[in-house]
Image (cartoon, rainbow, N blue to C red):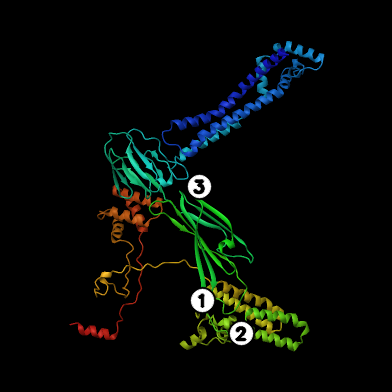
Amino acid sequence: MSADADFRSTVLRRLWRAILLRRAPLWAAALLPLLALMLFALLRPAPLSAVTKAATILLPAAWLIWFALDLRALQRRVRAEWARWLDAAVPALEDSSTLLATEPATPVARLQRNRLQARLLEVLREEDYRAIARTRIRFTLLPIIASLLCAASAYAWQQTRSVPASTGGKSASQSQPAAPGEIVLRVTPPAYTKAAAFESGAADIQVPQHSQVQWCYKRSGEPPATLELSDGQTLALTKDCASWTATESIFWRVRGGAGSRHNIRVTIDQAPQVAITAPAEAIQILPAGTQSVQLSVSARDDYGIVRASLHLTLARGSGENIRFSDREMPLPQSPDPRTRNWQKNWPLAELGMEPGDELYFFVRATDNAPGQPHTVQTPTYTLRLPGPQTESLDSSALPTLVKPESLRSQRQIIIDTEQLVADMPRLNAATLRERSESIAGDQSALRLRYGQFLGEESTLFGDEHGHDEGHQAGHAEGTGGFKDGSMASIVAEFGHKHDETDNATIFDPKTKEVLRRALKAMWDSEKQLRAMLPKAALAPEYKALDAIKELQQAERVYLHRTAFVPPAIKEEKRLTGDVVGAQSYKRAQGAADDKVPQDVRELVQALAGNGALPALWSKSARSIIAERIGGDEQKLAAQRAVQDVADGCTSCRAVLRAYLRATLTEAAVVLQAKPQSDSKFRQAWRSKEQP
């Protein structure tokens, strides 16, 4: 039996060697791009980005896993199918190769296996094993394509980003390592950005705000040079490096050199982005019986959030008896310091809310910027839990009036109307008319009382449309009403002889609109009641009640608390009578401010010709450009024009003049009354004083 096993292992070993030789080129071709990426990472002097570093480790590890899985799959295939492969490749084996893989059960099978063993070594040659490997093991291009794509993506990412993308680094136009004698830029981002320091040759770069930029020679012994920045600064480059703090985007060049300008674009530290995602509405009215409310908050910053808190203010009471309680809750930190995401299904009992209360809340977040961190606050959101359904004229958001005993509320009118609808089948026409007219009178009295808050007159019919129709009817009477041209006829034709109702009260437009909706519904209800249609009057009565409820809910208004800090009192001047330096309480006569300095106007005029420019013109031009022109690209282009004109470029004057003309604005016209009236008495007095 050992001889049979040795014979079978010999056949399998030869077949397995042919299969490995067939598969090896695929493994090697898939590994070559990854080896090239690793060689690029090792030979590159500049620091690698985090993505490239991860790719140089993960991609070879992925190749090893794929290699192990592929090798194991081949072993399984060979053990399961090698006999069938031999029968298909060598017809002389008479489809009996299976006898070599298993123990024959009959004497005839053992005899056939002995014949195959004697014949197999003569029939099977190395060419047959290679033919079986070519037929059964296919050469696929998918692993090679995947390897090339992964390596190329990592290389392209490194070319575009040389520091982590989360903190902002050099731009895609990063230069190659500086040649001997060239200038090297060393950028050290601020510590709070957690960005890695990097070096670059003379090229366009992008750096975070507040980064420390240094210009240094690659080798010592170079002659001193002067660096010119676009904002007018000059830096001396000697054996010691020249340093500059990145606060705004600029470009630089070497004075007297033939090199081009190179941009340093600054990524400004942005303020945090804070949002309240739940509830979605700024004013959320909770349904009756609500036990909990969902609050969800998200905050994000480009570098990090050091403090985020939820501010809650609970309002309880009504009218002038409203109590407020404030509460501040810090939001928990997340694994990513740049984000703060928090949500909670908050029970109303834990918030301390009861029916009739309102909860005002907002989120405030502060980033980790040094010096003056950015603080952002969301708008104030309101959670309103309606209280018991009570309604009266005194509790509405209107001025307090003494209500007569005979004035019924809107809810009482609805109850009377519903009772009348229920009693209609048992009432005769006279009784129905009497009760319907009585309810209509109550509705009319209530409508007139609410109409006074809009400045309406106490008339029986308060519909504003009737007023307009009356005027239109009056206008339509004749065509020659004002042919005489007198002022009285024109006023009678087109004017109003009474005050406008919209201007007769101090309510805001939203409150006036709700009042108009309530009055219109009351008027519709009154019309239906006077027509003895109490069932049709119920719908407008409920509309009027809803409008009154809306006025009640608008009774409480939340405003952020502000503090007044009075100026310090100088105790040494109190009760001394010293008025030196004291300002008059009278308002001084204002004057129109000149929006553009005079030297800039003169420079714009001088740039129109080829003559000499005013003294210190470049300083004035750079100052107005930095102040009035927004956007990095526009500002850098204008500063290039200033530098070109300073270098003697005559044709560049038109470009600079166009940028400066865009900053010119006309002075504002100040319209104020004269401090003193020029009367005839004053004119006569001045004429006597003159000799």
Q: Position of residue 582 (x, y in %)?
A: 27, 72
Amino acid type, residue under disc 1 in the picture = Phe
Q: Nearer the viewer, residue 197 or 610?
A: 197
Q: Nearer the viewer, residue 102 or 404?
A: 404
Q: Which residue is mark 1?
A: 507
> Closer to us: mark 2 or mark 1?
2
Q: Nearer the viewer, residue 595 or 13?
A: 13
Amino acid type, residue under disc 3 in the picture = Asp
Chain-order first, disc 2 or disc 1: 2
In the displayed structure image, the side of residue 375 where residue 402 appears, left or right: right
Q: Which residue is mark 3?
A: 336
SS at circle 2: loop
Tell me how far mark 2 sits from mark 3, CA to CA: 64 Å
Q: Nearer the viewer, residue 346 or 40?
A: 346
In the displayed structure image, the side of residue 32 where residue 373 appears, left or right: left
Q: Position of residue 234 (x, y in %)?
A: 29, 46
Q: Position of residue 268 (x, y in %)?
A: 42, 50
Tell me how far mark 3 sits from mark 1, CA to CA: 49 Å
- For label 2, count other residues whose C-alpha is less than 10 Å away and answer few (under 14), some (14-19) or many (20+): some
Q: Which mark is residue 407?
A: 2
SS at circle 1: loop
